[in-house]
Image (spheres, rainbow, N blue to C red):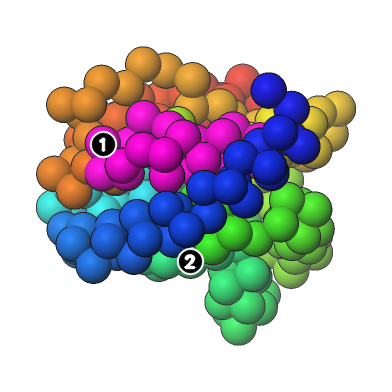
Amino acid sequence: MNHAVDLVLRAVMAPVLAVQAVRVRRHALILPEAGGPRSGVVGVGQDLRLLIVGDSSAAGVGVAVQDLALAGHVSRTLAASFRVDWLLQAQTGATTAVTFKRLQALPAQKFDVVIVALGVNDVTGMVPLELWLTRQRRLVRLLQDRFGARLICLSGLPPMGHFPLLPQPLRWVLGRQAARFDRHLRQSAAGDPALAYVPLDFAMSPDQIATDGYHPGPEIYGEWARVLSQAIIARLG
């Protein structure tokens, strides 16, 4: 099904989608961000400065502590090969535009690797694809110019079409748009040695989703960290 057909169907279903979106926001279980330190140093070996930026998933919503979230898993995995000095800058509800402004306010500093986990809130916020891609490019330039990033790992968008929280047809519509964003994100990184697109194409069963039916549970965070760590090690050796 092409994008033009998607647009027609979304227009037809707009009243239903609006009602469903309001109900989801009103009744959704609100989970806190993971507790614990948002920076640290682990491992031995070659120094690796790691910055993780993103939305609620990067902030660890769905698990109790950062050790069980993305930052904890990635830093521990990389610690087998590097001395990892890591920093987490993530916030529930963050979009690409919000993250850009937050990073602009930080002091300039150097990071070898940056993991970017953004896009879901841009999808739910109905940000147009081309505008989102423009904002992603601006974010990449900021990470390279202000933070000296040697490698930027662009995490793919999750399969929103399988989120238990979302009712149909809202789930279908958001799933289609997330998949479209994801395809273009992959294309934007193609051929650039300073960028690594890392898809979330591993199996996710409903019982691995957090209790809110929307965020990752511990197993998904662990697998997500594994594929990101593999991409980093493959590029940096």
Q: Give the range drawn in magenta.
A: 160-181
| Disc 2 to disc 1, C-alpha distance | 21 Å
Q: How many labels does the image show?
A: 2
What element does badge 2 sit on? Answer: loop
Q: Is residue 163 magenta?
A: yes
Residue at 17% over, 53% down: 65
Residue at 32% over, 22% down: 204
Q: Residues within 10 Å of mark 1 (few under 14, many from 20)?
A: some
Residue 201 x, y percent position in the rendering = 49, 20
Residue at 64% over, 69% down: 97
Left or right: 119 as drawn, with respect to 87: right
Q: In this view, does 120 lie above or below 186?
A: below
Residue 164 visible, this orientation: yes
Q: Identify which amino acid the numbered label 1 is placed on.
A: Pro
Q: Which of 76 and 208 is in front in this view?
A: 208
Q: Label 2, on which residue?
A: 94
Q: Identify which amino acid the numbered label 2 is placed on.
A: Ala
Q: In which quarter of the image is the N terminus?
A: top right
Q: Label 1, on which residue?
A: 164
Q: Which of 219 and 179 is in front in this view?
A: 179
Q: How crowded is mark 2: few (under 14 residues within 10 Å), some or many (20 or more)?
A: many
Left or right: 98 as drawn, with respect to 148: left
Q: Is residue 179 magenta?
A: yes
* Mark drawn on residue 96: none
